[in-house]
Image (tube, rainbow, N blue to C red):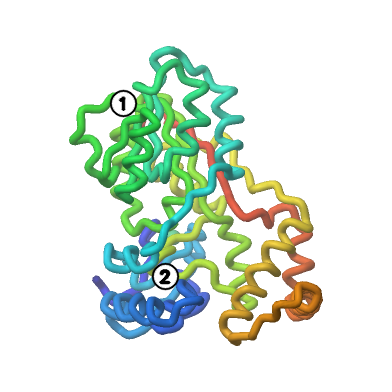
Amino acid sequence: MSSERCCPLCGSGDLKQLFSLQPDQAGKLLIPDDPARSAMISNEISKIWEDGNGAFVICRNCQYGFAWPFQAGNEAIYSILYDREFSYPDDKWEYNKAIDILLNLNITGDSTLLEPGAGNGAFLEKASLLFPGKQHIFSTEYAAAGVEEIRRKGFNCYNRDITTLHQEKIPGFDIICMFQVLEHMDNLQEIFHSLNRLSNPGAHLMIAVPNGRLRSFYDKWGVHLDVPPIHVGRFREKTFAYIGRKFGWNIMDISIEAQHYPEKVNKFLYERFNRLIISEKVPGSNNRLIMHLFRYGMKLLLAVRYLPVMIYLLFSHTGTSLLVHFQKQPGSK
Ligand SMILES: [Zn+2]
């Protein structure tokens, strides 16, 4: 890899570094509650960060945020991260948003759906109610347990990367949905070339990612939610506009997760509180009232410590996720 930093998406050298981490810091952020596994993952991370540190950088031209080195986590890293039973949420804002969009599309008896990185198939189950048969619904999944569950639910699922999916006997797709996948990938060009190859003319593409604008704000306050090499990409509206122009997709709509203010504040304080308890090794108490008061008091202190965040979360663009709805441009390959 060239040591000269440039944006992996647009090639610009007009960059701003947001933060950098040593491998042991990244390990602690990824696995805060288990020092042994944290040390193991740090060791694996140090093997791919050639100059010792990993950084997160923003491109001023397309606003794509990316890890440097721009290299995604490998199998060794993910197997340490997910060595315990991993449960997938059955419901997510982006699933319901995508269903709303699908309800307004003209889905016919021949329409086809693909979900790369389908987890345990929770979205496919919801979406399948809109399709005449499961035989038109396809997916990929990296985790073997996920593949098994998706197949048990009656959907087609391949344990392979979408960049090689065209090698399977599959139809072209009218609808492609990717939820919380793209931020893990370091091969955007190949991914979009594959999406173009796999999609039919006029196809719809829905992509949900963490809200990059919110995460860049958090970085200013020392709260790093995109930890490389697990998250190696960050997206904002302007990034998707660039992607659409570059790969031939028109933006139909971009939405940010609608959340009530107390929900956003609670989520932020709950996560900060848990990290504080783990990192400071605060002893617990069996007395529920004492624990309740302690938790309440700590959250209050955290709210004061992060007062600018509390104020920022009042804005409507500070939801957790971002979903873009693209339609393939006529004549685009
Ligand atoms: Zn760029």
Which residue lies under the disc numbered 1?
A: 172
Where is residue 299 drawn, in percent x and y?
A: 75, 74
Where is residue 37 drawn, in percent x and y?
A: 38, 76
Where is residue 165 drawn, in percent x and y?
A: 25, 38
Q: Is mark 2 within 8 Å of ligand 1?
A: no
- Look at the picture and state if 329 lies above or below 7: above
Q: Residue at x 60, y 87 (%)?
A: 280
63 or 314, which is in the foreground? 314
Instruction: Assess whether mark 1 and mark 2 are in contact (beta carbons under 8 angstroms).
Output: no
Q: Residue at x 49, y 60 (%)?
A: 234
Q: Quadrant of residue 214?
A: bottom right
- Look at the picture and state if 124 lies above or below 130: below
Determine the secondary structure under disc 2. Answer: loop
Q: Given the current orientation, which residue lies at the most extreme front position?
A: 286
Where is residue 194 drawn, in percent x and y?
A: 29, 40
Quadrant of ligand 1 in image: bottom left
Which residue lies under the disc numbered 2?
A: 228
316 or 136, which is in the foreground? 136
Q: Is residue 79 left or right of residue 245?
A: left
